[in-house]
Amino acid sequence: MDRFVSTFTNKIDAKGRVSIPAPFRAVLERDGYAGGIYCYPSLDAPALDAGGERLAQKIDGLLAGLPDYSDERDELSVALYGDVQVIAIDGDGRIVLPQSLRSHAGLQSEVTFVGLGDKFQMWAPERFDERRRVAREKVQEHRKLLGRQPPRSDGGDGEDG
Amino acid sequence: MDRFVSTFTNKIDAKGRVSIPAPFRAVLERDGYAGGIYCYPSLDAPALDAGGERLAQKIDGLLAGLPDYSDERDELSVALYGDVQVIAIDGDGRIVLPQSLRSHAGLQSEVTFVGLGDKFQMWAPERFDERRRVAREKVQEHRKLLGRQPPRSDGGDGEDG
DNA sequence: TGGAATTTTATGGGCGTCAATGGATCATTA
DNA sequence: TAATGATCCATTGACGCCCATAAAATTCCA
């Protein structure tokens, strides 16, 4: 299993250090950890996106499809690479987030790590709670669209919620 | 195809551990147990939903159709993954539920495990009794509509811890 | 068929390990 | 030398792992 899953909340200490949850570290190592994680402000949320080598390769893959020196490629590479920071993990599994990233996510004393499969996000706990509320509503909508079919002989997905 | 069926009630011990009913464990193992069960708050009930790899694949399947780095994917993956916790099963078939999940379901000293086919739910026994009572009434109404009478005297349905 | 022996389960507790956190020491550089 | 950052060390609390016990179910045998 080499996907980021589950959520964890850790503290930021007086020096600005945060422990990356051990399960996430394990994923990063298996992913081919190369000295640092890739971290950037989420495009559509007050949070930070982060990941390892696989995430970096995915970003590369998106650019690969576009012709060199096209406007799209320039714009997209600025959007994708422009704010990316490579952050080192210390011997105890901790990172220090630069001020610019911290302010984007409004991080104060705690960080909630949210596994999203190929990458993970870092949130201020309060903001994540709010987002989660919204997210649950959206899932309910999807559930109405996808699930909730009359039970077939197969049984299928009761999806009772 | 192995499915989660029946209900069982087990105790939460002083360390917060609960035994997963042996029949459910058997289903999880045949399902390709990979180190933990996937668990999240039920969307429309004071309970927890849980399952094994098959449930995880269902969640992944919802995301599979969406392009990487689209807004939809980001939002939906937060929605789907955000609440999910991966919970390890110890050598004796027990799990420890995080505080956040316990409070959603109001779990105190006992947990009622309810099989729902592809997944199962965890309830506080009192709350599940209430839910079951409502469900039975609805079933009775259906029977009347279908012109069938309950064949047996029916009483409690055993199956408890 | 009935009862004894054996296996499976649920539950409780002890203990060692590891992760998270805080603090100290050392290096680096302005 | 002061300040900043990086590496190392220490504590503590949680968690994983092991064993013990009792109850229940299952198997086995007379």
Image (cartoon, coloured by chain):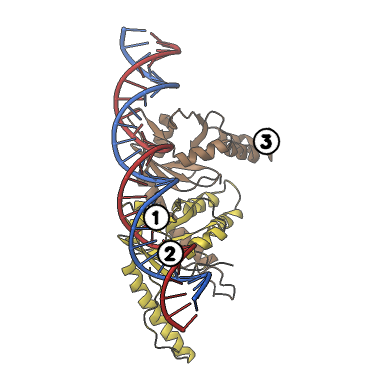
Chain colours: A brown, B yellow, C red, D blue
Residue located 38% across and 71% down the image: B160
Residue B121, numbered label = 2
Q: Chain of mark 3?
A: A
What numbered label is drawn on residue A70?
3
Q: Residues within 10 Å of mark 1 (few under 14, many from 20)?
A: few
Locate residue C24, reporting x and y percent.
31, 20
Question: Which of B145 and D13 lies nearest the eye of the viewer?
Answer: D13
Label 3 secondary element:
loop
| Residue extending furthest toward the right | A67
From the image, tell me which residue sits under label 1: A133
- Residue depicted at x 45% and y 85%: B142
- Image-quadrant location for residue B110: bottom left
The circle drawn on residue B135 is none
The quarter of the rendered structure image containing the C terminus of chain B is bottom left
Q: Is the residue marked by circle 2 packed among few (<14), some (14-19), or many (20+) residues within 10 Å?
A: many
User: In 3D space, how far apart are the residues under numbered discs 1 and 3 (Cα atoms)?
Assistant: 40 Å
Residue B47 visible in the shown view:
yes
